[in-house]
Amino acid sequence: MSATFVAKSFTHVAQQHVARANAHARSNARARTIANAGTGRFIVGGNWKCNGNLASVRSLIAELNAGDIVDNVDVVVAAPFLYIDEAKRTLKAPIEVSAQNCWVEDFFDATRHYDSQTGAFTGEVSAEMLEDMKVPWVVLGHSERRAPPFNESNEFVGKKVAHARFHGLSVIVCVGETLEQRESGRALEVIFEQLQAIADEIDDREHSSWGSQVVIAYEPIWAIGTGVVATPEQAQEIHAGIRQWLSGNVSGEGSQATR
């Protein structure tokens, strides 16, 4: 698949999503249903993954800039690292830019979790670097990072989320279940395990907390690239379960604020 085709396809999807988000935001009752009684602003995110070239990225940015976004919707795009600067410089407000990953040092040393240093980690990008470049968002825990060849564990994702929050980054944390896990009735159990690993790291730690800066993106792994789409009812069931879990395991305030 060509980079240009990917960019054009994403533009079409992004424009559809922004249009839907605008429609939801204009209808307060519908917005409350979508958010499962949450208090956070509606958010639309687009992950460009490892796609594009400079020409296609510029074309995509121009089309996104031409879109009409209502005031109470946040729009975030996760550009490949090489194109983050281009996106930051040329995307118009209110669209914000996200990194697709970041590194945390000393995974096995709990005593040095938040004073992680940059250093001999060839090919990695640290939360400190994103903070320095004023990149406001980062995507963590994506199913493609949890799966081979990266095999990021729940615990590793939890430490990444906590470290990113410590450095002031807003985080889009991805959770989801496989088809086998869903068919065995373990969907919520799996997602709760993923969330618990995050709560173990960011609960009651200075400068690292739940809230509107932590967006939970439910991605049913069984629906990615399979042609099978999760129904709104299936997604809403998971959303409601996540918010209930947050209320019981983090706080009522955190449950309401988390998007």
Image: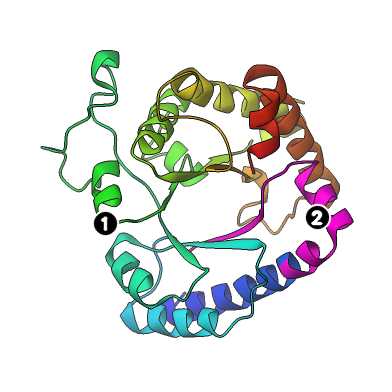
Q: Nearer the viewer, residue 169 or 187?
A: 169
Q: Residue at x 58, y 36 (%)?
A: 211
> Residue 201: x, y in percent?
44, 21
The label shown at residue 188 is: none
Which range of residues does the magenta coloring cover?
Answer: 22-48
- The Cα atoms of the two marked residues, 1 and 2, are separated by 33 Å
| Amino acid, disc 2 | Ala
> In the image, is 177 to the left or to the right of 185?
left
Tell me if residue 129 comes above or below residue 121 in the rendering: below
Q: Residue 2 falls in which quadrant of the image?
A: bottom left
Give x and y (percent) for residue 112.
Answer: 23, 19
Q: Is residue 45 magenta?
A: yes
**10 Å crowding of disc 1: few (<14), some (14-19), many (20+):** few
Image coordinates of residue 4 in percent, x first then y, are 44, 81
Local SS, label 1: loop
The earlier-in-sequence mark between 1 and 2 is 2
Looking at the image, residue 257 lies above or below residue 207: below
Residue 133 has which mark? 1
Residue 181: tell me if it is visible: no
Tell me the kind of residue under disc 1.
Answer: Met
Query: Does the magenta portion include 201?
Result: no
Seen from this angle, which residue lies furthest right?
Answer: 29
Evaluate whether residue 233 shows in this view.
Answer: yes
Residue 153 rendering spot, x and y as whole percentages: 43, 27
Which class describes the residues within 10 Å of circle 2: few (<14), some (14-19), or many (20+)? some
Q: Which mark is residue 31?
A: 2
Q: Is 3 above or below relative to 234?
A: below
Q: Nearer the viewer, residue 124 or 97?
A: 97
Q: Is residue 158 above or below residue 63?
A: above
Q: Residue at x 36, y 62 (%)?
A: 80
